[in-house]
């Protein structure tokens, strides 16, 4: 049964939200934007809390003033189209506004009063297209492309507008090799994946081999590194800096430039640590450590207890293990927290503030235009 309504706002995951006029339930709808008036069809029952369900847009009756025609002809929301850039349906300024709203909503739910947060406007990407320097495609030997959201369906892609020139050339070269019996997945698997970036050669093609991690937007990554360097310089000299989730040294390079006499960098991936060690950055000691181990802070306490500065850039799950964290870092004066997830950042930020820290600086960064993703850079100071 269909119903009509207006998209009032976006969910935390970036889906439009519309309220059913009769049952009062709210429904998440992909491919919609606040202000869209449309006809919707319920596709899934209400979730366990009985307040939300899922619907799809049947007919757009009146588009939002911020809505625009997507530049990419492969974008769609049927489950058989590429939905990798779902916010390409809206103008860029409204995308930035919604990214900030997403952050503030997460902070409100964690316990903060958004009106007291000095969250600046999202730093925009210098290029909305051609920015992506790495990508992953799936192939079954016959088709090659991206997997549709919530499905196991490979959407064949002839081109991708967000890839930079080198990555687009890689994509086109891969397509020229279809069909390819060597790319047929093993029994029980839906596909093989191919990971490429603009620093790796197109040949030979390595199936199911991940490339070393790097930020997907080089220009914005450089801006973030400059931001971090400026924040560290504002409060120099440093006696000892600890970096958690250092990867292969993206931000470690900036930390080393401060001239701090002792820098400890930790990461679970041994290959990333080896790559960092090979850079031979001054005063940097890189060590492998499982930063999600239940007793990790007790294990590291002797090495890091006298650190005055902490820099961390965790994955989406955030710190996750906080038991013993504040006792271990008893000498800390400054925390620079870089996050790719508003929800886990808000959770960790609330824990920091409850243990005597204040959120002194917030900068949001648009790393991936046309997606709900927003990067968070924050500085915490001890009360």
Image (cartoon, rainbow, N blue to C red):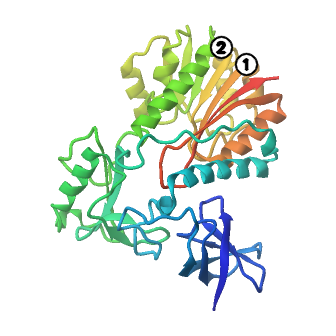
Task: Decide which of tag 1 and tag 2 comes sooner along the chain.
Answer: 2
Q: Quadrant of residue 262?
A: top right
Q: Which residue is mark 1?
A: 333
Q: Position of residue 305 (x, y in %)?
A: 70, 18
Whether residue 226 appears in this view of the structure is yes
Q: Which mark is residue 299?
A: none
Q: Is residue 295 above or below residue 315?
A: above
Q: Quadrant of the N terminus?
A: bottom right
Q: Which mark is residue 235?
A: 2
Q: Residue furthest front?
A: 65
Task: Classify residue 28 as left or right of residue 252.
Answer: right
Q: Position of residue 148 (x, y in %)?
A: 43, 69
Q: CA distance from mark 1 to mark 2?
A: 10 Å
Q: Residue furthest bottom?
A: 1
Q: Quadrant of residue 222?
A: top left
Circle 1 — which element?
A: loop
Whether residue 42 appears in this view of the structure is no
Q: Quadrant of the C terminus?
A: top right
Q: Position of residue 100 (x, y in %)?
A: 64, 47
Q: Is residue 155 above or below residue 259?
A: below
Q: Are marks 1 and 2 in contact (CB under 8 Å)?
A: yes
Q: Is residue 119 above or below residue 3?
A: above
Q: Nearer the viewer, residue 176 or 284?
A: 176
Mark nearest the camera among 1 and 2 is: 2
Query: Residue at 21% across / 57% down in the picture?
Result: 172
Circle 2 — which element?
A: loop
Q: What crowding class fits label 2: few (fewer than 14 Cα within 10 Å), some (14-19), or many (20 or more)?
A: few
Query: Residue at 57% across / 49% down in the picture?
Result: 96
Q: What crowding class fits label 1: few (fewer than 14 Cα within 10 Å), some (14-19), or many (20 or more)?
A: some
Q: Nearer the viewer, residue 66 or 23?
A: 66
């Amino acid at each position: 049964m269909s119903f009509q309504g207006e998209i009032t706002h976006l969910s935390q995951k970036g889906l439009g939200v519309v309220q059913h006029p009769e049952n009062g339930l709210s429904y998440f709808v992909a491919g919609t934007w606040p202000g869209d008036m449309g006809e919707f069809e319920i596709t899934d029952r209400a979730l366990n809390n009985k307040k939300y369900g899922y619907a799809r847009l049947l007919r757009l009756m009146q588009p939002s003033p911020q809505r625009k025609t997507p530049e990419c002809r492969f974008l769609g929301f049927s489950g058989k189209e590429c939905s990798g850039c779902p916010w390409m349906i809206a103008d860029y300024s409204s995308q930035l506004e919604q990214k900030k709203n997403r952050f503030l909503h997460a902070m409100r739910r964690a316990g903060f009063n958004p009106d007291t947060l000095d969250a600046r406007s999202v730093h925009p990407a210098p290029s909305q297209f051609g920015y992506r320097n790495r990508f992953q495609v799936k192939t079954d030997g016959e088709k090659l492309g991206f997997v549709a959201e919530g499905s196991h369906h490979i959407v064949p892609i002839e081109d991708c507008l967000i890839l930079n020139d080198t990555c687009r050339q890689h994509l086109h070269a891969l397509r020229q090799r279809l069909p390819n019996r060597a790319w047929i997945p093993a029994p029980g698997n839906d596909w093989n994946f191919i990971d490429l970036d603009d620093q790796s050669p197109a040949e030979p093609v390595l199936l199911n081999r991940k490339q070393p991690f790097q930020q997907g937007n080089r220009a914005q990554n450089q801006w973030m590194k400059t931001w971090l360097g400026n924040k560290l310089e504002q409060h120099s000299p440093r006696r000892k800096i600890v970096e958690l989730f250092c990867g292969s040294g993206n931000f470690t390079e900036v930390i080393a430039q401060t001239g701090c006499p002792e820098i400890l960098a930790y990461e679970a991936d041994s290959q990333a640590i080896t790559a960092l060690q090979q850079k031979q950055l001054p005063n940097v000691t890189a060590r492998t450590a499982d930063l999600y181990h239940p007793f990790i802070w007790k294990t590291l306490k002797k090495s890091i207890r006298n650190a005055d500065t902490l820099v961390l850039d965790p994955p989406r799950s955030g710190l996750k293990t906080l038991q013993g964290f504040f006792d271990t870092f008893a000498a800390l004066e400054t925390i620079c927290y870089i996050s790719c997830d508003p929800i886990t950042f808000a959770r960790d930020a609330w824990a920091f503030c409850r243990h005597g820290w204040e959120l002194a600086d917030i900068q949001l960064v648009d790393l991936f235009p046309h997606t709900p993703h927003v990067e968070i850079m924050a500085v915490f100071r001890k009360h």
